[in-house]
Amino acid sequence: MTNQEILQIALQQSAYDCNCDPDDFLSAENKVVLSRKNEKARAYLSLPFECDLVSYGSNIVAQVSPRMKETVEWYIGKYAVEHCFESPNVIALNERLAEFDYKVCFMAEYFLPDINAVRELPCNYELRVLFPADFEEYYTDEWANALCKARKHLDKLAVGAFDHGKLAGLAGCSADCETMYQIGVDVLPEYRKQGIASAITSRLAMETMKLGKVPFYCAAWSNIKSVRNAIKCGFRPAWVELTAREKAFVDEMNRKETGET
């Protein structure tokens, strides 16, 4: 695959996710569409969305419910594209969403591989390519970023770093859609800052592309460690996304984060 082919695959997937055409993301004009379920969308998306904004840099494609359409049109028409994904402007959106008992919830940056930059990186530990039967025992909290217990059937491939048989780091990829596999990474605290994350991520990206799938990587822009890992492994920023969810859903996530009951 070429970088252009990788981009086109990502644009097509975003079009499935957002109920629009791939070229809509490359327009100079914003676009608002009604959100609908699509069997080709990423498996973990809770479609239809009330409010979801996606940008590949040129514009914003917003998928909305009918009742949110006017509010979202106001928001993306009022502020510059890049400012719609950051404060203080996102606070203005959050205030308007309160009228519907919604809040801004997920905000993330997505990365695609640059085939000219992805390469195998060195590691002081043994690397093993793992398949579902090999990583069945690792569905535990310490490997929750690499593997997803709730969607085990989507976990297709992993790369582990082993220290004399002990798993020190694990990168796994999930078949979130037909053409693209998402990479997640975990490294045990005592093994961090040794290059393990970059070694297993880059190797997994290469193994994924051997299968004819596009690996992609997601990180919050505030997660500097994760973003650095993506860049080191040859991934480059591709698109950003902001999703609003029900106030009760967001509040529950915050309670779980702090351990409140």
Image (tube, rainbow, N blue to C red):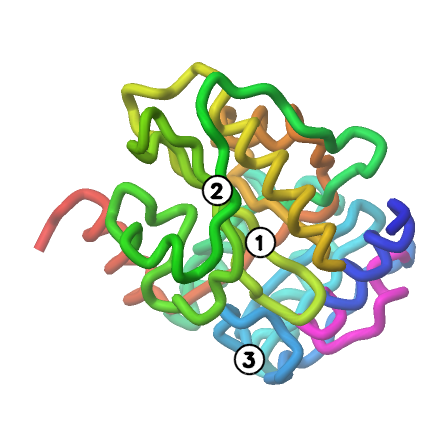
Residue 18 in picture, x, y percent from top left: 69, 71
Q: Secondary structure at mark 1?
A: strand
> Mark 2 is on which residue type?
Ala
On residue 182, the disc is: 1
Residue 62 in picture, x, y percent from top left: 69, 66
Label 2: how many residues lie within 10 Å, few (<14), some (14-19) or many (20+)? many
Task: Assign the C terminus to one quadrant of the image.
Answer: bottom left
Which residue is rendered at x = 38% and y = 20% of the image?
Answer: 192
Question: Is 27 above or below relative to 164?
Answer: below
Label 1 or label 3, whichever comes before in sequence order: 3
Q: Secondary structure at mark 3?
A: loop
Label 2 or label 3, whichever comes before in sequence order: 3
On residue 171, the disc is: 2
The residue stretch that appears in magenta: 14-26
> Mark 1 is on which residue type?
Gln
Q: Is residue 110 left or right of residue 145?
A: right
Label 2 or label 1, whichever comes before in sequence order: 2
On residue 82, the disc is: none
